[in-house]
Amino acid sequence: MSALPIIKKTTTRGRARLECEAASWVRFSVPFRPTFRWVLDAERLVLVLGDPVTGGWAYEVDLERCATSAQVLNWIAQVATKQWASDEILAGLVRAINDVLKLQANLCGSGRERGPIDVKAVVEHSRTP
C-alpha cells in the first residue's frame, strides 16, 4: 500500500475543498508553506502540492504523463525550475513519485527503460494491501 496520503475533493456551500486524514500528511512535509505537502489525488491521477489546512493547492504533476523514465525526469526538471521549489519540495516529489509508481520495479530497474507503463494500473496496484 502506498504511504502517500489520498485526497478527495468535496464541496461545501458551493466551494471546492481538498480533504484527507490529517495523520497521513506527516511524511511529505515541505517548507513551501509550513503545511504544504505532496499528496496523491488518485481519482485524477495527479500529485498535488497542497495545503490540507486551507484546502488550497499550489502545483500539480500529471501522473498519466509519467509513463516513461524520461517523462518522470521531465516533471522533476520542470518543478526544479520553479523559484518556490526548495530541495525539500523536490525531494518530496521524487519520494512521492517513487511511492506511487515504484520506479525501480516499473520504469527504470537496472538502468533500463521499462516504460511506457499503464499508470492507472500501477497506481491502483500500489494502493492495494
Image (cartoon, rainbow, N blue to C red):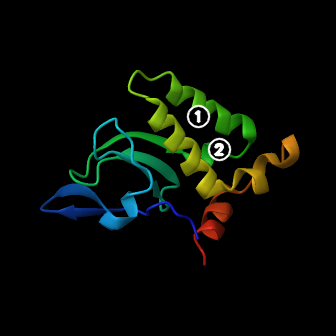
Q: Amino acid at mark 1?
A: Trp
In this picture, residue 51 sits left or right of residue 95: left
**Mark 1–mark 2 distance (CA, rounded to whole Å):** 8 Å
Which of disc 2 and disc 1 is earlier in sequence? 2
Seen at 58% across and 71% down, the residue is: 1
Q: Quadrant of the C terminus?
A: bottom right
Seen at 40% across and 21% down, the residue is: 83
Seen at 62% across and 42% down, the residue is: 65
Residue 107 x %, y %: 77, 49
Q: Amino acid at mark 2?
A: Cys
Q: Residue furthest bottom?
A: 129
Quarter of the view holding residue 22 = bottom left
Residue 24 x %, y %: 39, 64
In this picture, residue 99 sits left or right of residue 67: left
For disc 1, the neighbor class at 10 Å (few under 14, some 14 to 19, many from 20) is some
Residue 105 x %, y %: 78, 57
Seen at 50% across and 30% down, the residue is: 79
**Is residue 112 at all visible to an observer of this figure?**
no
Question: Is there CB contact under 8 Å for labels 1 and 2?
Answer: yes
For disc 2, the neighbor class at 10 Å (few under 14, some 14 to 19, many from 20) is many
Q: How many marks?
A: 2
In this picture, residue 75 sits left or right of residue 103: left
Q: Which residue is mark 1?
A: 75
| Numbered circle sitting on residue 66 | 2
Residue 41 x %, y %: 45, 57
Kind of element beneath mark 2: loop
**Foreground of the two, 109 or 47:** 109
